[in-house]
Image (spheres, rainbow, N blue to C red):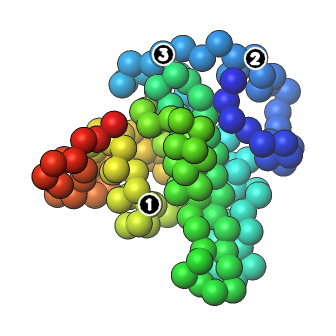
Amino acid sequence: MGHHPTGERDAVETAQNVETRHSAPPVLPKAGYSGYVASLLADAIAAQAQAYTPYSHYPVGAALLTRDGQIYTGCNIENAAYPLTICAERVAVFRAVADGQRDFVALAVVTVNGGSPCGSCRQVLREFNAGDLPVFIGTPAGQYRQTTLAELLPDSFGPENLPGTVHS
């Protein structure tokens, strides 16, 4: 079953049974995300509704799909001490990693105007993906475009660039 804290889905829940949708997760091939795009976008929209943005008023939601079919969501959380703010994409990644996940298959990000992930989020995602991660950037209306992490972060720096490190 996907990781969805209580109340996170209440804002945009549909008649679709979430427990059924995420039960018995399959092991997905790297390109096996296609059937999950609508679900990822819906989960990102639900996460966006939980964003805490009293300063920017720019709510962002993210949904990260793991190889075993689990979806981890995140929303941006602002702070009066601006540097302590955290983006939706990093919240989703950190939740997944804290739950033992490291193999990500796709990411959906939803903003009011289809804005793409910031550089910090791109670099955090790069830590776990060599660049072929599909990224769906959408709006609450459900419009989206598809790109990849490599397109968002060309000529990137990753764990393999550090001599003597083992990436797992």
Residue 3 on image: x %, y %: 69, 35
Which amino acid lies under the numbered mark 2 shown in the image of this protein? Answer: Thr
Q: Name the residue under label 1.
A: 121
Horizontal side, residue 46 vs residue 34: left or right: right
Residue denoted by label 2: 20
Amino acid on which disc 1 is placed: Cys
Which residue matches tag 3?
A: 27
Mark 3 secondary-structure assignment? loop
Residue 92 screen position, x and y as percent: 58, 49
Query: Where 70 sits versus 55, above or below?
Result: above
Q: Nearer the viewer, residue 146 or 3?
A: 3
Secondary structure under badge 1? helix
Alpha-carbon distance for marks 3 and 2? 16 Å
Cα gap from disc 1 to disc 3, whole angstroms: 25 Å
Q: Which residue is drawn at 28% across and 58% down?
A: 153
* Vertical relation: 123 (above or below) 106: below
